[in-house]
Image (cartoon, rainbow, N blue to C red):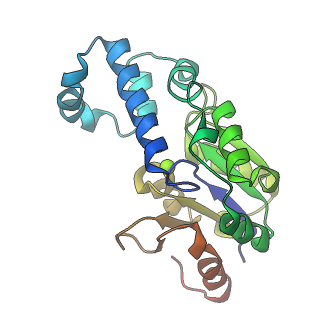
């Protein structure tokens, strides 16, 4: 039985391309500034160094850049309320499930609050946890959450749009995982959060391990 949801935020709770692009742009600019790379050369630099940085936090660690600085210069300068509007169907799905819901995000605390408010789901989220210096690993945060809620990994469902950073390790540790994506690349995927109810029902009914 699923007793708890853990959600990624960007790309999972919303897919607004303009907003996601804005964050991507800010991230590029931020790294260019910090590492003195020409903007035109960023893509080349990134593809050359990609394998050393499985995710943004490894990159920050490697270059000794604080997460707080990244948050303030990439996320806190964006106004998600200018891009997002209330998502009634999303609200309905989450409300109907009636489970404790946590958001675990690589964005900043401020930005996350604004996103959840803009989508109209702020009141349904028990807590939104941002990666930070002390908590710089998603799987560690997932484990803290299930400990505080006293549930097993099998009873917690993690939903994200990035297999590597959101779900891979969780799957290894027996959490239930759902990938939000376009292609059926992984055991369980849905196109958007609207498909969540059916999958949770499936998890609850079946003994099959996804
Ligand atoms: Mg995401």
Q: Is residue 57 left or right of residue 202?
A: left
Q: Position of residue 46 (x, y in %)?
A: 24, 31
Quarter of the figure that contains the N terminus: bottom right
Give 43 or 136, whichever is nearer the viewer: 43
Residue at point 64% right, 40% down?
A: 81
Q: Position of residue 167 (x, y in %)?
A: 49, 57
Residue drawn at 66 percent across, 88 percent down: 205
Q: Examine the rendering and report whether any part of residue 133 can be seen.
A: yes
Front residue of 18/203: it is: 18
Q: Nearer the viewer, residue 5 or 153?
A: 5
Residue at screen point 52% across, 20% down: 73
Q: Is residue 93 above or below residue 102?
A: below
Q: Quadrant of residue 200?
A: bottom right
Indicate the position of residue 145 as horizontal and vertical percent values: 73, 50
Task: Identify the image quadrant of residue 39.
Answer: top left
Residue 54, horizontal then vertical, whole percent: 35, 40
What is the tally of numbered marks visible in this picture?
A: 0
Residue 45 placement: quadrant: top left
In the picture, measured across the screen, residue 123 lies left or right of residue 210, that is right
| Residue 152 visible in image | no
- Identified at 66% across, 60% down, the residue is 87
């Amino acid at each position: 039985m699923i007793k708890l949801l853990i959600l990624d935020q960007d790309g999972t709770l919303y897919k607004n391309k303009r907003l996601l692009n804005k964050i991507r742009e800010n991230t590029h600019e931020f790294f260019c500034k910090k590492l003195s790379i020409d903007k035109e050369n960023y893509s080349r630099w990134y593809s050359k160094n990609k394998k050393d940085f499985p995710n943004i936090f490894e990159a920050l660690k490697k270059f000794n850049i604080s997460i707080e600085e990244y948050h303030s210069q990439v996320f806190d300068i964006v106004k998600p309320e200018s891009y997002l509007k209330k998502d009634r169907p999303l609200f309905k799905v989450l409300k109907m499930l009636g489970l404790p819901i946590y958001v675990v995000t690589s964005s900043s605390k401020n930005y996350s609050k604004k996103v959840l408010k803009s989508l109209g789901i702020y009141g349904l989220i028990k807590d939104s946890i941002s990666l930070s210096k002390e908590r710089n690993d998603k799987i560690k945060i997932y484990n803290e959450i299930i400990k505080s809620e006293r549930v097993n990994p099998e009873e917690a469902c993690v939903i994200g749009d990035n297999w590597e950073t959101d779900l891979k390790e969780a799957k290894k540790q027996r959490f239930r995982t759902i990938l939000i994506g376009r292609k059926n690349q992984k055991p369980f995927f849905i196109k958007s959060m609207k498909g969540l109810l059916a999958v949770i029902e499936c998890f609850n009914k079946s003994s099959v391990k996804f």
